[in-house]
Image (cartoon, grey):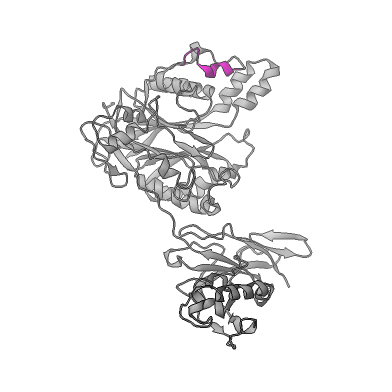
């Protein structure tokens, strides 16, 4: 016999739309090692595992043991089932389980009989009935009603009623599964005879729950011609001659651990759940350009790129520099830019690897400091600089050849400085509108933020005092790009009313959002959308949500919001055409 060694599900709480993929393996006695991920197409040592999924046929789901909640109930106490206050204690997974707890259970009967309510009715009277065990195969064992009799108090279930819902290693619960318990059976199969050769291993879940849905976020006009008419982002249609851009750090799966986010339910951290939640949110914004950070390379290939392609987007992707990162290729993250193929086509693309610039800077240091500098500066950070040619603006043709430029994730002051100098050279060659977008890992008022927002850094800025290598010369920290933060427009909203006041109160003293990253131990802004104000104007911005709404589940991520960052979205209009 070849027994199934182990079958584990990533969570015992199935969620609609969240794929369930078990870890299962067979033990080969001669190999002394378990073999995992076996399937029919690739058998190992002549064997594979067959996966069959079931759900309870009863509309009310299946009961679980009151002593061992992870086990399905097979017995019910008849006396408890007659009393609504005791029915939750009436379920047991086996005769042994019921026998082990019989002494306590009998005392519970006695205490309930002696209660004031029971003085008006015999204990055996079925005046108030609790919910019965679901399924057609439950049968009672009748007895004389003696409270001290174990046999007279047992109701026996021969088997729960199950209906098969799928075969294969994975199963994605649907709306039809809500309220039902799922069961996975794994059987070792001989590839030559296709007959079972091992014991069946079974895993039973809790009831399937619906996927929580976040509150839709609205677009808030900031252009005076539009007035203050807020609309849900999914319902808003961009005016002719405008385009929208979304920036979102989606939280790489390799960082979404229970150790870091212990306050988030484990099932809500699973990539199978988060990816569907993120996709619904991203597509709901209907952005023309989508800039995502912390996109794992395998998730880009297997999920983001094909799913967004179905919705009319082309894409470019760049992962972090591998020789510095300690992660494997398939668990390395990077930044991805998606654009609607009916509106844009790529004109030029630049991939920026900041390790190269950091190593050049480190080479100019004394050997004693060089290795320390490299370890601090070389983090594998990358950026995409993408020049897009406009083919057709939303809901109307546009014959101009205006282009938009977008940038992904940034970190560290020298990285930002290197980037800006590179963009200045590009802008000098082709005077086109520019967007600098992403997770900068820098809070408002910091030296990197000041450099981006104002074009220079004060020599007395406190951040410069920590320059242990003497590389950040204030006279070199400047640029001439005339960048403005899109969300600073909220600070200058005119008019009155709750919507206006709410957004003005969501902006800090640096004219940036109060937060874009909200974890249990950090609350602050790290994400920005900068633009060149001489060539672009802000028409509308995605509203900033109250902290109270996002912290219903303590912090981000949560069942409703699947990243520790919030998305930023801006609608722009070209101020002038470019030949």
* Left or right, 393 with reference to 561: left
Q: Is residue 571 visible?
A: no
Residue at the spot 56% in from the left edge and 75% down from the top edge: 114
* Left/right of residue 544 with respect to residue 185 in the rendered view: left
Q: Position of residue 288 (x, y in %)?
A: 34, 40
- Up the image or down, 122 lies above or below 371; here it is below
Q: In which image quadrant can residue 102 be found?
A: bottom right
Q: Is residue 115 left or right of residue 501?
A: right
- Relative side of 231 to 35, left or right: left
Q: Which residues are magenta?
A: 457-467
Q: Is residue 110 magenta?
A: no
**Quadrant in which the C terminus is drawn:** top left
Of residues 98 and 503, the one drawn nearer to the viewer in this rendering = 98
Where residue 237 sits: x, y (%)? 26, 43
Q: Residue furthest top?
A: 475
Is 458 part of what is drawn in magenta?
yes
Q: Quadrant of residue 1?
A: bottom right
């Amino acid at each position: 016999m070849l027994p199934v060694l182990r079958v584990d599900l990533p969570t015992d709480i199935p969620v609609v739309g969240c794929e369930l993929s078990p870890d299962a393996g067979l033990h080969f006695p001669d190999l002394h090692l378990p073999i995992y991920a076996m399937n029919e197409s690739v058998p190992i040592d002549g064997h594979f595992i067959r996966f069959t999924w079931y759900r309870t046929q009863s509309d009310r789901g299946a009961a679980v043991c009151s002593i061992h909640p992870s086990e399905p109930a097979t017995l019910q106490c008849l006396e408890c089932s007659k009393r609504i206050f005791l029915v939750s204690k009436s379920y047991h997974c086996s005769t042994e389980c019921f026998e082990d707890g019989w002494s306590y259970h009998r005392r519970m009967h006695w205490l309930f009989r002696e209660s004031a309510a029971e003085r008006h009715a015999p204990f055996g009277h079925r005046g108030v009935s609790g919910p019965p065990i679901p399924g057609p195969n439950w049968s009672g064992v009748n007895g004389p009603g003696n409270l001290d009799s174990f046999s007279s108090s047992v109701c026996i279930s021969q088997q729960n009623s199950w209906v098969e819902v799928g075969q294969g290693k994975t199963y994605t619960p649907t709306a039809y599964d809500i309220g039902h318990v799922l069961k996975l059976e794994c059987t070792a199969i001989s590839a030559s005879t296709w007959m079972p050769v091992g014991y069946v291993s079974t895993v039973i879940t809790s009831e399937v729950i619906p996927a929580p849905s976040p509150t839709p976020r609205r677009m808030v006009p900031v252009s005076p011609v539009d007035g203050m008419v807020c609309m849900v982002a999914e319902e808003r249609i961009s005016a002719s001659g405008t385009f929208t851009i979304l920036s979102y750090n989606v939280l790489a799966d390799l960082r979404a651990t229970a150790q870091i986010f212990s306050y988030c339910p484990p099932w809500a951290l699973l990539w199978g759940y988060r990816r569907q939640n993120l996709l619904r949110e991203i597509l709901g914004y209907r952005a023309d350009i989508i800039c995502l950070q912390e996109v794992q390379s395998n998730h880009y290939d297997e999920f983001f790129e094909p799913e967004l392609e179905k919705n009319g987007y082309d894409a470019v992707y760049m992962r972090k520099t591998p020789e510095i990162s300690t992660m494997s290729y398939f668990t390395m993250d990077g930044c991805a830019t998606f654009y609607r193929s009916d509106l844009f086509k790529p004109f030029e693309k630049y991939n920026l690897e900041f390790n190269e610039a950091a190593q050049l800077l480190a080479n100019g240091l004394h050997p004693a400091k060089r290795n320390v500098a490299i370890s601090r500066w070389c983090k594998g950070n990358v950026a995409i600089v993408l020049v897009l040619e406009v083919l057709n603006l939303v809901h109307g043709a546009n014959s101009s050849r205006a282009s938009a430029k977008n940038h992904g994730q940034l970190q560290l002051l020298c990285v930002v400085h290197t980037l800006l100098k590179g963009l200045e050279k590009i802008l000098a060659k082709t005077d086109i509108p520019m967007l600098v977008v992403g997770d900068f890992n820098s809070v408002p008022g910091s030296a990197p933020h000041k450099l981006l927002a104002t074009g220079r850094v004060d020599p007395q800025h406190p951040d410069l005092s920590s320059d242990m290598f003497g590389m950040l010369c204030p006279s070199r920290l400047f640029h001439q790009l005339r960048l403005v933060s899109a969300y600073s427009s909220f600070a200058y909203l005119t008019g009155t009313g709750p919507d206006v006041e709410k957004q003005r109160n969501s902006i800090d003293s640096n004219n940036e959002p109060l937060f874009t990253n909200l974890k249990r131990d950090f609350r602050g802004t790290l994400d920005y959308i900068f633009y060149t104000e001489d060539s672009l104007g802000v028409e509308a911005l995605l509203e900033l949500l109250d902290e109270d709404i996002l912290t219903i589940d303590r912090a981000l991520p949560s069942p409703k919001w699947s990243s520790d960052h919030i998305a930023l979205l801006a609608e722009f209009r070209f101020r002038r055409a470019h030949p």
